Image (cartoon, rainbow, N blue to C red):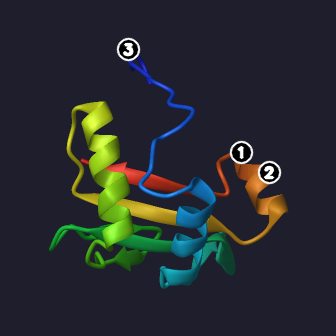
Amino acid sequence: MQDAEVHYLRHLPLAEAPDIVMRHLIDEIPWRAENIVAWGKTYPQPRLIAWYGDARKNYTYSGILLEPLPWTQALLDIKSRVEAIASQGWSAAENVRWRTRAALNRNIVPMENFKLEG
C-alpha cells in the first residue's frame, strides 16, 4: 500500500474484560461456513464468517454474497470505540473465525478479527 499510514493499537478498552467479550462473540455470532472454488475445485473456506453492517451494505467476494446482519450491542460497542480512536466511521464489518490453528498460521492474522469497511 503505497503512501499508506498504518497505526497499531495493542489494546482496545472495552466495556467488559476482553475474554468475556470474545467468548460472547464466539458463542452468539451466527457463523457461516462457505465454500470457495479454486482451479475448478470446491473447497471449504479456512474461516467462518459473519457480515454485519448498515442496511444494504452487501459484500461479495469469490461468488459469495454477504448481506449484513443488524449490528449487535457488543459489535456496536466495539465499533463506536474503534471509530472514536480512528476518527472515522464504518458501515460494515466482517467477523472472521479461523477453523483451525493451521489455517490461522497460514494466514498470519488474529484468531478472530474484524474487517471494518468505511
Please rate how many residues cluster around mark 2, counting C-alpha atoms within 10 Å: few if below 14, some from 14 to 19, many from 20.
Answer: few
Q: SS of the residue at dot 2? A: helix
- Residue 13, given in percent of the width and then of the height, sits at 45, 42
Residue flagged by tag 2: what amino acid is it?
Asn
Question: Residue lying furthest top in this view?
Answer: 3
Q: Quadrant of residue 18?
A: bottom right
Tell me which label, 2 or 3, sits earlier in the chain: 3
CA distance separating discs 1 and 2: 5 Å
Who is closer to the viewer here, 80 or 112?
A: 80
Who is closer to the viewer here, 79 or 60?
A: 79
- Residue 22, given in percent of the width and then of the height, sits at 58, 64
Please rate how many residues cluster around mark 1, counting C-alpha atoms within 10 Å: few if below 14, some from 14 to 19, many from 20.
Answer: few
- Quarter of the image with the N terminus is top left
Q: Is residue 19 above or below residue 43?
A: above
Residue flagged by tag 1: what amino acid is it?
Ile
* Residue bearing the label numbered 3: 3
Question: Foreground mark, 2 or 3?
Answer: 2
* Residue bearing the label numbered 2: 105
Q: Is residue 27 above or below residue 108?
A: below
Q: Quadrant of residue 20?
A: bottom right
Q: Quadrant of residue 89?
A: top left
Query: What numbered label is drawn on residue 108?
Result: 1
Q: How many labels sit on residues? A: 3
Residue flagged by tag 3: what amino acid is it?
Asp
- Residue 65, given in percent of the width and then of the height, sits at 36, 77
CA distance separating discs 3 and 1: 23 Å
